[in-house]
Amino acid sequence: MARAGARLRIRARGCEVNKKYRSKDWGEFDAGRQYGIAADVLGGYDPMGTGNFNENEWSVFLYGIRFDNTLKYTKSVGPVTVELQYSLGEQAGKSGAGVTSGAALSYANGPFSVGAVLQQSQDASSARMKLAGAGGSWVAGAAKLYLQYVEARRDPGFAKAASNSGGALANTSMIGNSGNTLSRTDRVWTAGALWQAADAVEVTVGYMNDAIKNVASSGRTGRIATLYALADYHLSRRTDVYIGLDRTTLGGAEIDDLNGVMPFAGASLGAGAAHSASSRNGAAIGLRHKF
């Protein structure tokens, strides 16, 4: 049996159309603006999936979140799932500019799941971002444990076009390596746990650490680290209230990094900006409803 569907959403620069075709025999095909394959796979091995604030979601900016003009294919055979992604660049006269491609393989059986992903993006000048990542999760009683590792390498001068500009990689939420004559490498590992403390209560703790090589042309190293905790009380299946705490620190050349994930995300950390800091504590309380 096959099923097809479409979804339309209005954006600042026009219409956003997502189409889906699902077949029991052939798998699932998705087209339009889609989550990238790295975000799909690695989000399953992150204690929070994707965080709500810059300080607990910054790792996703290394590989991008959603991509325009994307074709995705997913096929599961027993406990094994294969995913493929190809995102068109739509840059006239430059067939490879703005293109993102990726492949992922995952295995899930009972309380145990592991997965790995490869992803590559190319900018308007043929500079590339290459990513390799792997992760796993394990359910142990009322707790679920998470672990993942990501390595992202950016060629010298790798750059994303401004959002909504129509340029290469414009709407991907991906950091660049502008002005750097060296290849930058981010090596990130994340570990954490989710504890089902009661039927309606969840507690999540996690730690993210990024060891950065060649932060800038000087060849210096840097570091980003975040420790966070989150408590959720579910009022219903779709609505919850939450309280979160976090501490983020920057080290080495990352404090002055103009290409860093913190200034990219709009956080007042690093980049040598006025009143910037090398560490910050955060607290949040909110009400969330899932549609």
Image (cartoon, rainbow, N blue to C red):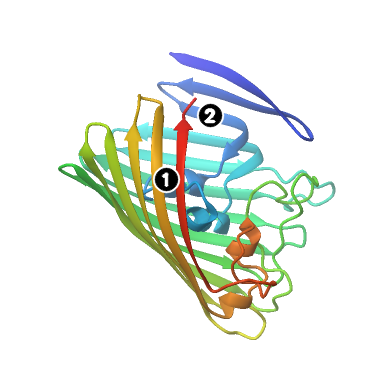
Point 49% across, 53% down: residue: 57
- The residue labelled by disc 1 is 49
* Residue 97 horizontal/vertical position (percent): 74, 53
Three-letter residue code for mark 1: Gly
* Residue 242 horizontal/vertical position (percent): 39, 41
- Number of callouts: 2
Of all residues, the one furthest to the left in this rendering is 141
Q: Earlier in the sequence, mark 2 or mark 1?
A: 2
Q: Residues within 10 Å of mark 1 (few under 14, many from 20)?
A: some
Q: Is residue 56 above or below residue 223?
A: above
* Residue 283 horizontal/vertical position (percent): 45, 54
Point 48% across, 28% down: residue: 28
Which circle, 2 or 1, is nearer the viewer? 1
Separation (CA) of disc 2 from disc 1: 23 Å
Compared across the picture, whether 235 is left or right of 222 comes to left
Compared across the picture, whether 96 is left or right of 224 comes to right
Q: Is residue 71 above or below residue 203?
A: above
Q: Which mark is residue 155?
A: none
Q: Identify which residue, 214 or 37, lies in the foreground.
A: 214
Three-letter residue code for mark 2: Phe
Q: Identify which residue, 64 or 156, lies in the foreground.
A: 64
Q: Which mark is residue 29?
A: 2
Quarter of the image where one finds residue 235: top left
Q: Is residue 104 visible?
A: no
Q: Identify which residue, 80 or 152, lies in the foreground.
A: 152
Q: What element does badge 2 sit on?
A: strand
Q: What element does badge 1 sit on?
A: loop
* Residue 246 horizontal/vertical position (percent): 42, 59
Q: Is residue 64 above or below residue 218?
A: above
Q: Is residue 12 visible?
A: yes
Q: In which quadrant of the rendered image does the N terminus lie?
A: top left
